[in-house]
Amino acid sequence: MSVKKKVRFQPYNVTIEVDEGENLLRAAMEAGVHINASCGGEGVCGKCKVLLEQGELDSQRGVTQSDEDWRLGYRLACQSRVLSDVVVRIPPESLLDRKVLRLKPKQARLRPLPFDIAELQASGRYHPAFEKKFVKLPSPTLADNVCDLRRLREGLRKNHGIDNITLDFFLLRKLARVLREKDFEVTAVLDFAQRRSRKPRLVDVEPGDTTGNHYAISIDIGTTTVWGQLLELTEGKIIGEAADYNAQISYGEDVISRIVYAQKPEGLDKMQKLVVSTINHVINSLLKQHRVARQDISHLTLAANTTMTHLFLGLEPKYIRLAPYTPTTCMVPPVRGRDLGLDVEEHVFVYCISSVSSYVGGDIVSGVLGSGMYQESKLTLFIDIGTNGEIVVGNQEWMACAACSAGPAFEGGGIRFGMRATQGAIEDISINPANAEPMLITIGMVKPKGICGSGLINILAALMETGLIDPNGRFRENLDTPRLRLGEDGREYVLAWAADTQINQDLTLSEVDIDNLMRAKGAMYAGYLTLLENIGLSIQDVEQVILAGAFGNFINIENAITIGLMPDLPLDRFHFVGNGSLLGATCVAFSREMLEEERRVALMMTNFELSETPGFMDQYVAALFLPHTKAEYFPNVQQRLKSSASS
Amino acid sequence: MSVKKKVRFQPYNVTIEVDEGENLLRAAMEAGVHINASCGGEGVCGKCKVLLEQGELDSQRGVTQSDEDWRLGYRLACQSRVLSDVVVRIPPESLLDRKVLRLKPKQARLRPLPFDIAELQASGRYHPAFEKKFVKLPSPTLADNVCDLRRLREGLRKNHGIDNITLDFFLLRKLARVLREKDFEVTAVLDFAQRRSRKPRLVDVEPGDTTGNHYAISIDIGTTTVWGQLLELTEGKIIGEAADYNAQISYGEDVISRIVYAQKPEGLDKMQKLVVSTINHVINSLLKQHRVARQDISHLTLAANTTMTHLFLGLEPKYIRLAPYTPTTCMVPPVRGRDLGLDVEEHVFVYCISSVSSYVGGDIVSGVLGSGMYQESKLTLFIDIGTNGEIVVGNQEWMACAACSAGPAFEGGGIRFGMRATQGAIEDISINPANAEPMLITIGMVKPKGICGSGLINILAALMETGLIDPNGRFRENLDTPRLRLGEDGREYVLAWAADTQINQDLTLSEVDIDNLMRAKGAMYAGYLTLLENIGLSIQDVEQVILAGAFGNFINIENAITIGLMPDLPLDRFHFVGNGSLLGATCVAFSREMLEEERRVALMMTNFELSETPGFMDQYVAALFLPHTKAEYFPNVQQRLKSSASS
């Protein structure tokens, strides 16, 4: 539990509660209080000076700050952490017109939907498909010399009512030894998932009582990053998490370039081995870090987009890329980990979440499972934004889904200074409408070197709200500020001057960048409308929006609505689930019912090829506007923009 | 079809029908006509001279035969083959007392129970578990771009009503290519065996229509020999058969010595690889000889005794040998052939016939299946004699079984001149009661070098019938013949003088040899009685006797009854099935129902450990007599012996 502290910003008399230790500049941004700050938080520009009036800050002295200044109580907001309830005053040089102050915080950061084992347990859904059962078998005698397997079967039947088990051949190779190692006291690992057959499957046998050591690992193979969680199955706890870059990344950043590489001689094999090496690394980290023995892992669950799943399994990905875009398979039978090169015991199988189509993959199905959407009665819009945006609309009764070729704009692609969300990326902004001066926040609070996806959304929204761009995404030409100028790519806004950056050049956002962003957000929005309208529904019918993907967690929803990326719905209808793919993989590891449901859920999701769907192109063109050509779709945004303009 | 010819032996006026080309000495033996012959049929002793009176013989002239002799029509019986109906006369030097002549042939050689595909087909049991189905799938379009696997599933459902298939992961790796190779015309190989799950399993997919190329291979792993049959599944034909010595044989002749070897470091792995190399050799021979492509093999079926099954699978065999004799498993799940090192395609699984216990193995269950015993309403006694004799008693309702430690006597073990049934082994005999001179027939009609199992039975029976030994197996001492004498191992009968053998020493059977034979046959007979009496039945209740094992085919049943190895029942109750193990493996490859039945049949067979079964030791001691201490068990033998003695 984090301790909360109050920060009051004067002269606005705006108070916000933050975690103890929070950076003061971030607190101001969160409170909607503008403070000039153009170095991203590294403390070099010295512009974010505030006066500490009450309480305690842990502050680093600015490099250019005078003794006098420090003694008087001036502190750099970007270099200060909140230690107690404090009152700070914005000095005149940072002070904005009153109208800049947003009187309420832009957005209370929404929490992810909790993944709640206790609730699963309470609702009777907490049955991992894999269970450990201890049995004390009678020792064989001449009068009772049935084979070892039958002795074990009978023990399981008598002691646990488990009958008709199947098993893998390899298990038999150690059965005689294991049974005798602790004098016929053994623990059976059983798979109750109904995917393979109607019968429980005996997965492993271990000498003595090992019911206390029972783990699984869930894996999400992202195109960029592979995530894994170590799961304790008896009590249902997530023990730890690890991640690593997908080693395929050297051969292309997106799925298409990976598919192209796989067409080369040995290319598929190489792609397969690379991702397996990454997964092995993640598994090994988890085991080492949490001191769990490899043989205590009973199974792996895995979710990934369709291409990643194909490459992981060594399946031909060629026809995913070529029209009419047919994967080899959307449903994968359980696969023995070792057959794929995974560094797991012989008995460990991998359970892959099913895909729907070439571009609506197991990661999305997993998110639909993990977020609970498949059990919702509310009409839900599920959105995962990455290189491709995937959309699912529906509820427990029906679901429609589609992939939007949103392009990689929100991952920084096609944007001159676009970058991934790593250190030095501008992630948030406030712009002083009076002089167009920005207040930047970067990841890691260092000098900026580019703009990440969430930063792009926030910048675009700020440009709209300050009236610096018009609804076509064109910069106003009649403003007297050096921040707006004509650059190589047409007109542009200077986010940071060269001296305040890590890249020694002016860091800008141009109209070309904005066009790319508009195409990306337009494709998404057209996708929502197309799916909904094909089913006879409208945006206003959506009762709940679930945002998945690491990116989703960092999106400022109100800003995303402002630019027309998200539908204009009340903020309380939005939920984040974070990495939905990993979440779903974890859920199916914890819940037999969900593991059994996943194929049904995938089959339930009707795939739309948007390029083939009537109306999509019209919707797309209509969405190439800020926020949208049809103002009625964004009533709240229109009102907000009007009130900014009039104030 | 063989052409039959009649042979009349004068002066007895005995006629027998034989196949054209049959050896005349064998014909005489079959007809019960004694002709002196001590060189086993190699033509060197010159004693088996007969006079050709009518018809045509293809004869080699004897090495010592004079021109005159030849011109007069004298021929060596052992050097003559029957080309037409013939009349031959036994010359005075071969002529016996009238009483020696058995007026009817000792035994019409019984045919194996036919393995009749036509009957299986007629009775609706001809459904191989594996079927090939051709489907012409619609090519994918943007409006119909489901994944390849779903396209195939839907094709199978629409065209063949096959639904809910499962499949192995590896198949997916080639699915995209195979579907497109012949423009979405494919043949699916499906496994309808219910062993793995309730769902049909997709085994393989092949481009185009390959329904005409559909094969399986059945394998019998004998301790000595590995047999295989190549099976065409569409029409249900046995295409060919091949055999090779089990390469494990260099490491011990019997199962116990193999188990002992497997306890050495890497010993089990070596045993496993050796038998797999033999099976691969058999498979390769079959494919090459019959020009069948490896990829057209859909599955393997396999039967073997419990130890051979364990060694083939690499399962710990140690506890088979140690009391209380527990195998690792009696039931084996289908195993991927390549996981065992078999030279088959990725998709090929091996289906092993279940065992009952450590010493009643899959070979016996297979014989019970293949012989049809499991469907018989008649009370049946199933006997397989080898190093261990295995016995099954029962019918379609119940079965009891046991292994008898008969010892290797019938395989030549423990008998001074005992040998396997290979060239030079004495396999049949007739003895002139007047002078104790023998008429020998050897395998390959060469000079004798030893005695095989069936020969031992026939010799012992002949010694009994001529009164040369008493019911205790002791040679009479008051006979004036050089054939009976005191040797190294006590009293003995000289079967062949050194000059007439390949071994340059007198070839004999001693009282010690006879004791060993009596122990072996006594153990078997005590086994039958113990099983029957434990169930409240007697020998006379047995309505049918099935003899399995290669050895079984060569046993002269009447002689086996005479010595007390077989029960004294009418000859028409006896049937041979030859290699029952291979027969059953072939049956389950041809019949889904039988494949599904095999576990039930194995489970139905109640195993008795004879050493632990009340009454066995008493029965055994009572059986150490020729034919048995209780004369009432062998009424026909008693009568026959009496009539021989009185005549």
Image: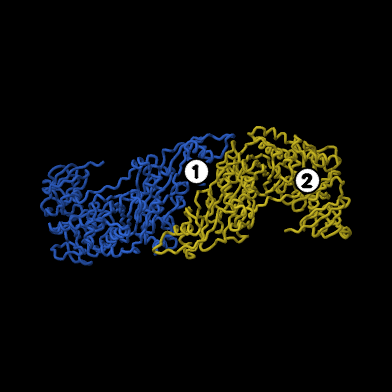
Chain colours: A yellow, B blue
> In which quadrant is the C terminus of chain B drawn?
bottom left
Chain label for disc 1: B
2 or 1: mark nearer the eye: 1
- The answer to which image quadrant residue B264 occupies is bottom left
How far from the left and from the top, in percent, is residue A32? 81, 49
Chain label for disc 2: A
Q: Give the camera-side residue of A494 and B455.
A: B455
User: Seen in the image, is B86 located left or right of residue B268?
Assistant: left
Q: Give the camera-side residue of B180 and A499.
A: B180
How far from the left and from the top, in percent, is residue A175? 47, 59
User: Seen in the image, is A36 located left or right of residue A527?
Assistant: right
Report which residue position mark 1 lands on.
B165
Residue A241 visible in the displayed image? yes
Secondary element at image label 2: strand
Residue name at image x 52 percent, y 47 percent: B169
How far from the left and from the top, in percent, is residue B9? 14, 47
Q: Residues within 10 Å of mark 1 (few under 14, many from 20)?
A: some
Task: Please tell me whether residue B179 is drawn above or below residue A303 in the rendered image.
Answer: above
> In which quadrant is the N terminus of chain B drawn?
top left
Q: Amino acid at mark 2?
A: Leu
Report which residue position mark 2 lands on.
A507
The answer to whether marks 2 and 1 mark residues whose Cβ atoms lie closer than 8 Å is: no
- Marks 2 and 1 sit apart, C-alpha to C-alpha, by 58 Å
